Amino acid sequence: MVKTLEEVHELYEAIDKDDREAMADAYGDILVTLIMGCACADLDLVECLAGAYNEIKDRSGTMGPDGIFYKDK
């Protein structure tokens, strides 16, 4: 978890600097740390993603320019 947080911080800095190359690197690094974390917990990342997606797939709303999903009321 600590490594994932470090990588998220790097992503935040890359976004703040509008550095697309650093963003791509950080997103990749975050995914690697999530895969490793799931492996340590004997979980499958794809199954975790599928479960999360199934919870939200039928929600309606719009994605704002800030990248935040705003649910319809």
Image (cartoon, rainbow, N blue to C red):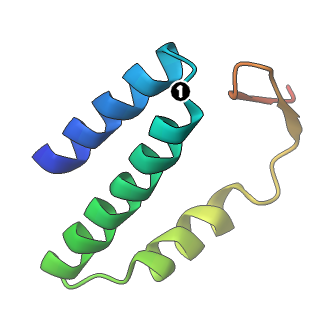
Q: Label 1: state its secondary structure.
A: loop
Name the one closer to the observer, 41 or 28.
28
Name the one closer to the observer, 4 or 38.
4
Compared with 24, 50 (above or below) is: below
Name the one closer to the observer, 12 or 17.
17
Q: Is residue 49 left or right of residue 45?
A: right
Q: Residue at x 52, y 47 (%)?
A: 24
Residue picked out by circle 1: 19
Q: Residue at x 80, y 23 (%)?
A: 64
Whether residue 7 can be seen here: yes
> Where is the C terminus found, in terms of image quarters?
top right
Q: Amino acid at mark 1?
A: Asp
| Quadrant housing residue 14 | top left
Q: Is residue 40 left or right of residue 25?
A: left
Compared with 56, 45 (above or below) is: below
Q: Is residue 48 left or right of residue 64?
A: left
Residue 27 drawn at (x, y percent): 46, 49
Residue 12 drawn at (x, y percent): 41, 24
